[in-house]
Amino acid sequence: MNVGEIITTLVREFPYALYGSVLVGVACAFLGVYVVAKRVVFLGAVLTQASVLGLALTFLPFVPVPHTVGAVAVTLITVVIISRMLTEKKTPRDAVLGVVFITSVATRILIMQKTPHVEAAEIENLLRGDILFVTPELFWLMAGAFVLAMAGHLLFFKEFIFVTFDAETAATQGYRARGWEMVFYLIAGVVISFATHMVGDLFVFGFLVVPPVAAMLLTRSVKGIFLVSVLIGVLAPVVGLVLAFMFDFPASPAIVGVASVVLAAAWLVSIVRR
C-alpha cells in the first residue's frame, strides 16, 4: 500500500488508534516541556511505571476496581509521595525517583506472578502498547483528561511557567512553589495514567522527553518551545503509524523512532547554528 492508502485505512479501520496516538503525543509533548525544564525527566518513567502497577493491582481477584481507576489511584498516590520528597533538600531528586521506579517495577513483577497466565499476558500487551486496539471509551476518557489538563494550564499558565523556569525569583515574589508543583504533578499524573493505559509506557515516556528536548534545541523562547514540541507530538505519531503499516513495525517503537529522528535532526541544526 502507498501512503495515501495507509492513511485511508487508518482513518476507516483504526480511527481511535490514529486520533488517540496524536492526542497522547500532544499531551505528553506539552507536559514534557515542564518535566524537562524542571530536570525531573525520570519522573515520566516513574509515573508510567506507577500507572502500570495500578493496572496490575486491578488484575488481582481481591481488588475489584476498573483498570483505569486503579491506574489513576496508584499514580496520584505516587505523585503525592514524590512531590513531598522532591521538595526536601536531604535526599537527591534522582535517588527519590530511582527508589520509587524500582519499587514499582519490582512490585508489578511480583503481582504478575500471582495472576492467571492469560491476565499476565494481557498486562504485558499493555506494556508494549496496543495502539491499534484503543477503545472508544478509553479514547474519550483520555480526551476528557486532556481537556481538563489544558484548561488548568491555560488558567494558571503564568504561575506554572514562573515556578518552572525561574523558581528562585518566583519564591521571592511570593509564589508558593511547593503548592504549584503539587498541582502540576497531580495534573501530569492523571494524564500519564490515562495515556499509559491507552498506548503503553514506551510511547508515553518517549514523548515526555524527546519532543521537548528537540524543541529546546531548535528555539529559545518559551512559547516557541511549547509550539515546536506540540507540533512534533502531532506529526510523529502519524508518520510513525504510516511507517509501522508500511514496514510491519510495532506501532509504539516506530512512533518513538520517528520522534528520535526529529531530535537527531534538531541536534544537527543546533550544531550548525553554533
Image: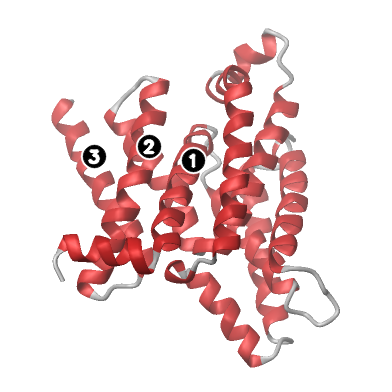
Q: Position of residue 254 (x, y in %)?
A: 31, 64
- Colour scheme of this structure image? secondary structure
Comparing marks 3 and 2, which lies closer to the viewer?
2
Q: Is residue 74 left or right of residue 194?
A: right
**Which amino acid type corresponds to the residue marked 2 in the rendered image?**
Ser
**Upstream in the sequence, badge 3 or badge 1?**
1
Q: Nearer the viewer, residue 103 or 95?
A: 103
Neighbor class of circle 1 (other Cα within 10 Å; few <14, some 14-19, many 20+) is many
Q: Which residue is mark 1?
A: 32
Q: Residue at x 26, y 62 (%)?
A: 8
Q: Is residue 256 above or below residue 83?
A: below
Residue visible at 18% across and 60% down?
4
Q: Earlier in the sequence, mark 2 or mark 1?
A: 1
Q: Which mark is residue 229?
A: 2
Q: Nearer the viewer, residue 126 or 106?
A: 126
Q: Quadrant of residue 218?
A: top left
Task: Single out the residue that lies furthest toward the top.
Answer: 173
Decide which of tag 3 and tag 2 comes sooner along the chain.
2
Question: Residues at badges 2 and 1 in contact (C-beta under 8 Å)?
Answer: yes
Residue 267 is tagged as: 3
Residue type for callout 1: Gly
Query: Which tag is nearer the camera, tag 3 or tag 1?
Result: 1
